[in-house]
Image (spheres, grey):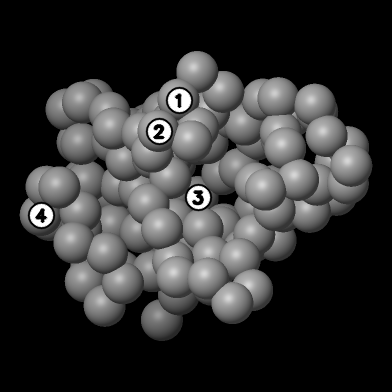
Amino acid sequence: QVQLVESGGGLVQAGGSLRLSCVASRIIFRLNNMGWYRQAPGKQRELVAAITNTGTTKYADSVKGRFTISRDNAKLTVYLQMNSLKPEDAAAYYCNADRDWPLKGYGSGYWGQGTQVTVSS
């Protein structure tokens, strides 16, 4: 049963923007904190941004000031607005829902299938 569905990835030039979306089932969205992780080839999955179910946010240092995470409780959707994209931002981006805060990472909670972001230089 698919419970988290990401969309919005694609190819963008360096300096450009993308907005990722993750739609969750109602139960998952309301009970969990949400986050975006990314994994580039040959690298470990890393937390990019996270948001609690009350709106507290957390960002990786590498994306602070460029990425914004938000959630729309009515639409059961969490967003990741990515601006000023760099080639090093290219990765598969995964949506995560977890009851714990801070998020525990891979193996904890619910995960989407991922959406690919490619940044050309």
Identified by mark 4, the residue type is Asp
Q: Tag on residue 64?
A: 1
- 22, above or below 84, in the image: below
Give the distance between the C-alpha atoms of the residues marked 4 and 1, in whole angstroms. Answer: 22 Å
Identified by mark 1, the residue type is Lys
Identified by mark 3, the residue type is Cys
Picture coordinates of residue 98 (x, y %)? 20, 58
Residue underneath mark 3: 22
Mark sitting earlier along the chain (3/2): 3
Residue furthest out toward the top: 65
- 1, above or below 77, in the image: below
- Which of the 4 image quadrants contains residue 64? top left
Question: Residue at left 79%, top 54%?
Answer: 118
Label 3 neighbourhood size at 10 Å, few (<14), some (14-19), many (20+)?
A: many
Give the foreground label among 2 and 4.
2
SS type, badge 2: helix
Give the distance between the C-alpha atoms of the residues marked 1 and 2, in whole angstroms. Answer: 5 Å
Residue underneath mark 2: 61
Give the foreground label among 3 and 1.
1
Give the distance between the C-alpha atoms of the residues marked 2 and 4, in whole angstroms. Answer: 21 Å
Q: Are marks 1 and 2 in contact (CB under 8 Å)?
A: yes
Q: Tag on residue 100?
A: 4
